[in-house]
Image: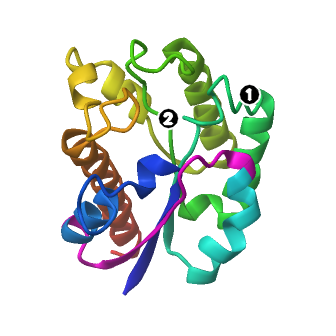
Amino acid sequence: MKTLVCFGDSLTARHEGKDNPQLTEKLTFQLPQFRVVNAGVSANTTKDALKRMEKDVLTHSPDLVTVLFGSNDAAVHKKVALNTYEENLLKITKLIGPDKTILLTPPPVDEALQPNRKNNELARYAEAVKRVSKETGSYLIDFYTELYSRPDYKEVLVGILNDGLHFGDAGYDILANLITEKIVELESSEEQKFD
């Protein structure tokens, strides 16, 4: 069985009232060929992520890893500078291996409920993710644009906390579907190579 590790912050880790992290539950159902490991830790930045990579990600010998950080890196009260964030993502991608890495751009927030986070700033961090993906040849899911382009994106961001950052079921459905689509696409192109 293949192993998928979901590496991230609270957006990866949250249970939203369920027994297991929402993302893991949905992906386990949608991708039965994978053992899905949740390596999300609340409040983490890319700086924290680098410190726990070996223990939380690499020890699982993953076939694929989703990497979703930036919501904390871009926050006023935690601030990891944009160039440092980009360097950290480069390191993370190289440690995992670009051919196993699916980078996700950090999602937008409802600014009315999130005084420490601004969408124009998150967009800059999202652009950094795209640059790293291009530079390393790793895979990309533009979660930021996917949500922000929806007229109802603020409704999608509503979760149990209703804080404009930690989304609920609707947001996790979108996130899990995007990851599943990307993995199915990767697997079908893998199969074509061997045909």
Residue 39, given in percent of the width and then of the height, sits at 52, 65
Where residue 48 is drawn, which disc sits there? none
Label 1 with label 2: CB-CB less than 8 Å: no
State yes or no: residue 41 in magenta.
yes
Is 32 situated left or right of 56 in this image? left
User: Mark 2, residues whose alpha carbon is within 10 Å: few (<14), some, or many (≥20)?
Assistant: many
Residue situated in front as seen by the camera: 168 or 151: 168
Task: Kindly identify which residue carries mark 2.
Answer: 106
* Residue 106 location (% of width, % of height): 50, 35
**SS type, badge 1:** helix
The three-letter code of the residue at mark 1 reads Leu
Vertical relation: 151 (above or below) 129 = above
The quarter of the picture where the C terminus appears is: bottom left
Three-letter code for the amino acid on which mark 2 is drawn = Pro
Quarter residue 41 falls in: bottom right
Quadrant hosting residue 96:
bottom right
Under circle 2, the secondary element is: loop
The span shown in magenta is: 30-47
Residue at 73% in and 37% down: 86
Return the residue at label 1.
Answer: 82
Measuring from the top left, give residue 174's x and y in whole percent: 25, 42
